[in-house]
Amino acid sequence: MKGYLLAIIVGVGAVVILVIARPAAIAQAQQSSVVFNADGTVQVPTGFRKWVFVGAPLTPEGLNDGKFNCNAAGMNCTKSNFPEYHHVYIEQKNVDAYLKTGDFPEGTVIVKELTRVLNPTFPDSSRKEPSGRGYFNGEYNGIDMSIKDSKRFAKSNGWGFFTFGHHPMPYEKTSAERPVAECAGCHIANVADTDMTYIKFYPLLRDKPGY
C-alpha cells in the first residue's frame, strides 16, 4: 500500500514538474532574440526596446558632409552614414555576462535603432529648448543589428551585421548579412580587441559602474 501511494506521489510530482517546465520552455522559445529564415536572412527584431539601453552615440547631419543611404536614383542621400542618434540595446543576460567577463557570449544580439534629431533650427542641426541649445530625439529612422555566432560568421571575426534600412518606419522586414566591406570591416579595423563592439561609446559597458 505504501509503495502504491509513493508511486502516485512520484507520478503527481512528475506531472507538476512537467506542467511547470513546459510553459517555461515555451516562454524561452518565444523570447528568442533573432529569427533566421530558410534563406539565411534574418527578420527585423522586435521587443528590443525592453532590453538594456546601453548608450546613444550621435552623428548629426549638420556636422557631417558625406553621401550615404541614397535611393536607387542616387537621390535623397544623407550626410552621415547613421543619421543621427544611435540607440543601442542589448539583452540583460548578455550585458551581465560582458560585465563579468569582458566578452559577449555566443548568441548575443545588439540592436541599434536610429532616430533623427528633432526639427533642427541651426546649421549644426541643433535647436533651442527650455533646457538649453542642443540635440533632441525626433522620429525613428532605421535599425541595424549585429549577432555573435563564431561558426556562422567565421569570415567576419565571429559577428554578423544586418540592416533594415536607414529611413523612417516601416523598416524592411528582413535583411541578408551585409558585406564585410560595408559593416564588419570597420569593426575589425577599429574594435576587434573589444569584441567587435564600440565599447568606448557605452558608459555602462566601458566603466562597469553596475546598474
Image (cartoon, rainbow, N blue to C red):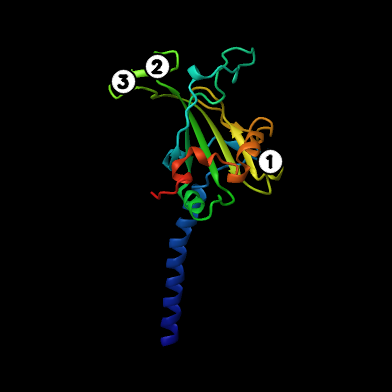
Q: Residues within 10 Å of mark 2 (few under 14, many from 20)?
A: some
Q: Residue sitting at 60 percent across and 20 percent down? A: 68
Q: Is residue 150 left or right of residue 61?
A: right
Q: Residues within 10 Å of mark 1 (few under 14, many from 20)?
A: many
CA distance for labels 2 and 1: 38 Å
- Name the amino acid, label 2: Asn
Q: Name the residue beneath numbered marker 3.
A: 129
- Say which element carries label 3: strand
Is 74 in front, or is 123?
Answer: 123
Is 47 in front, or is 77?
Answer: 77
Where does the N terminus fall, quadrant-wise? bottom left
Q: Name the residue beneath numbered marker 1.
A: 156
* Residue 32 visible in the picture: yes
Q: Quadrant of residue 174?
A: top right
Q: Nearer the viewer, mark 1 or mark 3?
A: 3
CA distance for labels 1 and 3: 43 Å
- Name the amino acid, label 3: Glu
Q: Nearer the viewer, mark 2 or mark 3?
A: 3
Q: Name the residue beneath numbered marker 2.
A: 119
* Residue 1 visible in the picture: no
